[in-house]
Amino acid sequence: MKGHNSLAKGAQSAVRVSIVVNLLLSVVKFSAGLLGHSFALIADAMESWVDFTSSAMVWFGLRTASRPPDKDHPYGHGKAEPLSALFVAFVMLAVAVFIAFEAIDHIITPHELPQSWTLIVITGVLATKELLYRFMLRKARHFKSTSLEVEAKHQRTDAVTSLAAFVGITIAAFAGPKWAAADDWAALFAAALIFHQGLKAGKTALSELMDKALPDEVVNEVKSTAEAITGVVSVNACFVRKMGFEWFVDIHLGVDGTQSVIEGHAIAHEVVDKIKEKFPQVYDVLTHIEPYEQ
């Protein structure tokens, strides 16, 4: 379990970075949007606030998922991670709808032009979000974490909404009053992006909660590991699913039917040991021995 605990702690550390950065960005963007009369920047600030909230939920999910199995949860608490990712997806969808309604209201209601100095703020935000996206994606791939991957993609979406705000403010600020709504159209575009990303994030989380099988290349590699063990004549079935940071393997092994139960048991044990050795993220391997028939 040490390997799993180190993965969980490393992932939690990455999320804490995201929490701090997104909180600071939400404050900076909201203040600049309010003072600079830019609803696109305010919408962007709301996106960062969602990032802050979702990062906090992801951190909670990762912390819960890292707890060891107990009497009531013999398979561990791994599903807390995709559950937190699903919550993040729902928050993204709700915020997207709110921003869309507010943007439409601003489009049909006359208002002040955004200030050009807000573009300087957005430029700094764009650089920060891109760096955070790359950092989170690298950590998600390293720790093989669904919620970290969702979080990383959310950072990229936030960067795109900031870019949309940059374009909208530029048009509204320099093209004159007739183009004042460009800032609000940018906010509406941002809402569409957030909604789309929320749907994708929700689909990813639901897939893991529904025990979706890992990719064929992973399953085939597990099968090959088992087939290489002396005494394994065939692998009749192999299923691999992910729960939090951990993988669970169910495998049916074909062995010589004339062997004793003790010999078959020893072969199964060796298969379990080799799979866990090759794939540290595997928490448990359930083996089923079947007599091989020519």
Image (cartoon, rainbow, N blue to C red):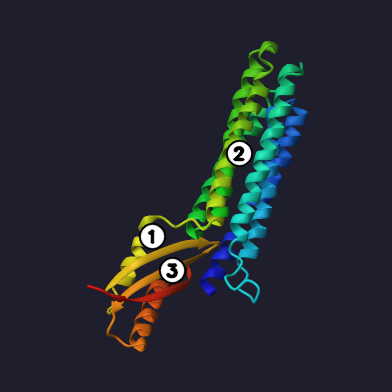
Disc marking residue 137: none
Alpha carbon distance from label 2 to label 1: 32 Å
Residue identified by numbered label 2: 158
Mark 3: amino acid: Asp
Element type at marker 2?
helix
Where is mark 1, residue-wise?
Answer: 218
- Local secondary structure at mark 3: strand
Of 176 and 197, the residue lying toward us: 197
Classify residue 179 by image quadrant: top right
Count of numbered badges drawn on the protein: 3
Determine the image quadrant of residue 63. Answer: bottom right
Q: CA distance from mark 1 to mark 3?
A: 13 Å
Residue at position x 68%, y 54% in the image: 57
State the residue in front, 209 or 197: 209
Residue at 62% x, 18% y: name it.
Answer: 171
Outermost residue toward the left? Answer: 294
- Residue 284 in the image: x percent, y percent? 48, 72
Inspect the image, locate mark 1, and give the three-letter code of the amino acid beneath it: Val
Q: Residues within 10 Å of mark 3 (few under 14, many from 20)?
A: some
Q: Earlier in the sequence, mark 2 or mark 3?
A: 2
Q: Position of residue 69 (x, y in %)?
A: 60, 73
| Quadrant of the snapshot with the N terminus | bottom right
**SS for dot 1:** helix
Q: Nearer the viewer, mark 2 or mark 3?
A: 3
Q: Say left or right for 258 vs 23.
A: left
